[in-house]
Structures are given as structure tokens and as C-alpha cells.
Image (spheres, rainbow, N blue to C red):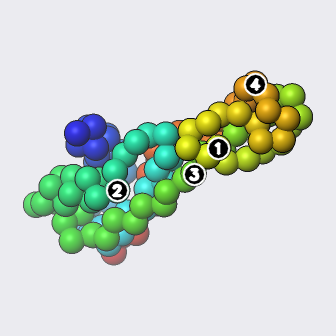
Amino acid sequence: MHEMSLMASIFDILTRHLEDYPGVTVKKVTLRIGSLTNAVPEALEFCFSAFAQGTVVEGAQLEIIQVPIKIKCRECQQESEPVEFHFRCPGCGSLAVDVTQGRELALESMEVE
């Protein structure tokens, strides 16, 4: 389950940021997760709860913003969302495409009290 290692990295980031604000309680954590990460939201939620136990994050809400895959054709410049991982331009049929969105794995924000 790679979600456990992903969440370990997220908690490392959270911990570093929270060191500057002793005594706060985290109410909400928002993550941006691209489809290409293959992270399962339910598994992330489970891992979030496990890592949060006994910390200032315990009881916080986890919001996951799922980011779809987008590609841009190098030939005709058309931007689109590939269907079923077929990375071919729907406009001109070219395979010369760049992934412009969908690889994200980011701590978008956290709300504290």
C-alpha cells in the first residue's frame, strides 16, 4: 500500500509547518491528488487517521481534491482529458502529447485553531 508512504511524507510536511505554531489544533487538511498517482482516496483516509492518532491532527477532516489527467498535443496544441489512459490527441490523432495535469500530490492547505 503506497498510500502509507505518501501519508508519511504528508505528515512530515505537516509536522515541519506546525513546529512554528505550538498549541494549535489542526481542523482540516486538504490534499490535491492527481489520477496518475494511483492513490486510493479511501486508503489515504485510513492512513490519515492512523498517522493523526495522538497528534494535534487527530480528529481533523481530510479533504481530497482529485485532479484528472490532462494532455496537450505538441502537433495541434489541443488540450484534452485522455479516455482510459489512451494518450493520443483526439483532434489530430498524434501520440506526441505532454501530460500537463494529473501527477500532483500536494498538501494544498491546512486549517488550524
* Amino acid at dot 4: Ala
Q: Earlier in the sequence, mark 2 or mark 4?
A: 2
Identify residue for label 2.
41
State the residue in front, 96 or 108: 96
- The image shows residue 30 at horizontal and vertical percentages of 43, 61
Q: Is residue 21 visible?
A: yes
**Contact? badges 2 and 4 (CB < 8 Å):** no
* Amino acid at dot 1: Pro
Left or right, residue 46 beside residue 90: left
Mark 2 packing: few (<14 Cα in 10 Å), some, or many (20+)? some
Q: Earlier in the sequence, mark 1 or mark 3?
A: 3
**Contact? badges 1 and 3 (CB < 8 Å):** no
Between circles 2 and 1, the one closer to the viewer is 1
The span from disc 4 to disc 3 (Cα, nearest Å) is: 19 Å
Identify residue for label 1.
82
Above or below: residue 41 compared with residue 8: below
- The image shows residue 66 at horizontal and vertical percentages of 49, 57
The span from disc 3 to disc 2 (Cα, nearest Å) is: 14 Å
Identify residue for label 3.
68
The span from disc 4 to disc 1 (Cα, nearest Å) is: 13 Å
The span from disc 1 to disc 3 (Cα, nearest Å) is: 9 Å
- The image shows residue 2 at horizontal and vertical percentages of 27, 37
Q: Earlier in the sequence, mark 2 or mark 1?
A: 2
Residue 79 falls in which quadrant of the image? Answer: top right
- The image shows residue 38 at horizontal and vertical percentages of 40, 42
Q: Earlier in the sequence, mark 4 or mark 3?
A: 3
Q: Is residue 8 visible?
A: no
